[in-house]
Amino acid sequence: MASNGLSEGDTPTSWLDRLVANALSWFALTVAIVLVPGLTYWQVANVHEIGYVNTNQLDADLRYDVVETMGVSALVGLAAYLGVFVYLRRKGIEVSVREVFVGLNRYTFVLLAIPLLTAAMSRGIEVSHPLFTLALIAAATVIITMFIHRLRSDKPPLASGAPTTIHWALVAAAFTFYAGMMSYLAVLDHRNIGTHIFDLGIYDNIFWNTAFDDFLGCSYCKLEKHVSAHFDPIIWVWSWVYRLRPQAETLLLIQAIWLATTVFPVFLIAQRALKQPRLAVMMTWAVTLYPALHGVNMFDFHSLTLAVPTIVWVIYFIDSKSKVWLWIALAVLLATREDMSLLACFLGAYAVLRRRYVTGIAMVLVSMSYLAFVKLMIMPDPGLLMADKDTYGYAYFFKEMIPHQDEGVAGFVVSLGTNPTYAMQVLTHEDRVFFFLVLFQPLLFLPLLASKKRFMMLYGFLFLGLATRRYVYNLHFQYSSVLFPILLASTPAGVVAATKSRLPKLLGLDRRRVPHILLSAVLISTALISVKYGAMVPNDHFRAGWNRLSRRLDTERYEYVQELVAQIPDDAVVCATSALGPHVSSRDTSRKWPACKESTYALLATGRFKKKDKNRLKRQIRQGRLTLIDEGHGMGLYEREPETHRKPASKAPSRPGRSEKDEPRDEDAGGGETGEALNPHHMSPEEIEAREARAEDADEE
């Protein structure tokens, strides 16, 4: 060694290069690690100021207080590192400072996840910076997963084996946890007047009529039948459960419990692919935390949502080469809704890719034959997207891809084939990118590695990615049900594909440990994203359909609603506003305000009325159409008097060219027999109320 500290052949420049390289490899990392405890301590001690993480708005003196705290933390941390070095040297262990620091950093680096999590968990960031929030969660997931891997590096890899009683108990616990939690939240939302006629009230009325001998009858729908919108005979099956307690809350319980059963086929698929029951259990718990599952669960009730566990069962029975059970599951899927026939064709194509040629082709033929039969023989409009005046059309879902609505599906295909760049423009819209990220990131994009299963995702990609109705590509509505069950079922195959790829070798990982690393990361990622975008933890992003989810029951208001409902005879025809509709829809005939034809009672959330509705209510009271029975908490119950018993309307200043006898009756209000009862445009309740108000005002003109 030369006297200047350089070895022979070294130049000052090469020595400096090595010093910088070493510093960057371990000393800079050490400095970052020892700063974190101070930053964390300050944030915990000043939790009321934690919002600065998102806004960078902090008083000048507090900013320097943070710097001082971090400085003290750095000094204490470096002293601790050096203390370990001195301790080891005194023990006679010949180590360098660099070796000690590097050795400690192998585990203390997990502290770097804390500021990432602090930023990601700051209130409101999931709404103001959604993509950045996902990036923070991704970085934290990588750090925490690396830490877990290093903790387990000296333990043997998990051994293959069959599930034991303990494993099945953990799966049952996942089922119980999800079913209990989501049932509670769904019923709580309903009792807080958070559900709507669109769509809980509609389905409650369908179940009521189906249970009591009017198959798929619906007083809210065109033709008084749900076939004007969809054909979902699965409702008849579930109506036998509904009979036990025929009311809207029963549907919410059915939906939550049925969705909870998704953990069972996912567990079986994961066990079959990975041969490690502990990893399969981890996958089932990831399912319970999956935000998209929460979203479809918490938006009222939909027959489409019931397809989620059935889709996963069909995939499992294809993989396990089942025969009888596959056809039973397929029958249940087809009965769920008529458009599930299209998705079933993609499942059949997957069976062909799995070399179940006869089964796969038969699945496609049966599915298409069923769809043709339903469209031609049962539903009033044979078109896939429907356009008849007596049905509800769906071409507007894809209005950018179908610029001429009368073209229907053909217009969609023409746009996709002749203008693929525009289709890419639609697909890569920022809101859609975020939507797909929240579907895929919890699962680490592993489903994309499941080569044979990717084809099943195509239907969901096209339907969700090219829809231009914003509620379709939204976590808080039911439509993601056509894609995410396939993603959950494909994740174990993605793990297997990643394990067999060149990635473990490039990262220097033992292939036997890769499945555990990936499933740990899936569980961590899903849990963190669920905190910001799921239902189980309060956050600013999650919605139960259109409205925020209130987590505390307004007992006094709910009891008052029950008192009002108890005053209505069971056989009465009731007209109600949207949020109160599901509380009176368990009857033969229900209507939506202001389309109150034939109704004998009106249950109205008058506290939410805007000027036009207030004037409409005053006018009907003045004309003797409505008589107040009880009111309070911004709600009122009114009785509609028969026309022959109505009081003469009080004289009001008449408008030129209009006589009192020209004043329209309530039966004429609302645009048709049900006043656009089914929600053909999936508008918000406020938009629907405004539309119906405009319709009645137009009639009056």
Image (tube, rainbow, N blue to C red):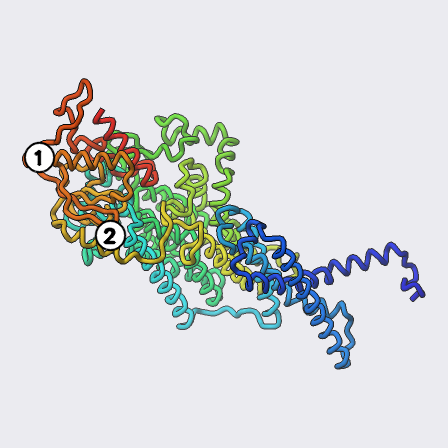
- Taking the image as shown, residue 139 lies to the left or right of residue 586, namely right
The residue sitting at the bottom extreme is 91
Q: Are marks 1 and 2 in contact (CB under 8 Å)?
A: no
In the image, farthest residue toward the left:
644
In this view, the mark in front (1 or 2): 1
Residue designated by label 2: 248
**Quarter of the image where the N terminus is located:** bottom right
Q: Is residue 183 left or right of residue 351?
A: left
C-alpha span from label 1 to label 2: 36 Å
For badge 2, the amino acid type reads Ala
The reply to whether residue 348 is in sight is no
- Percent position of residue 490, x then y: 46, 53
Residue 204: x %, y % from top left: 23, 48
Q: In front: 57, or 269?
A: 57
In the image shown, does 698 or 585 lie closer to the viewer? 698
Residue 310 vs residue 109, the one in the foreground: 109
Q: Residue at x 70, y 62 (%)?
A: 31
Circle number at residue 647: 1
Q: Is residue 50 above or below residue 340?
A: below
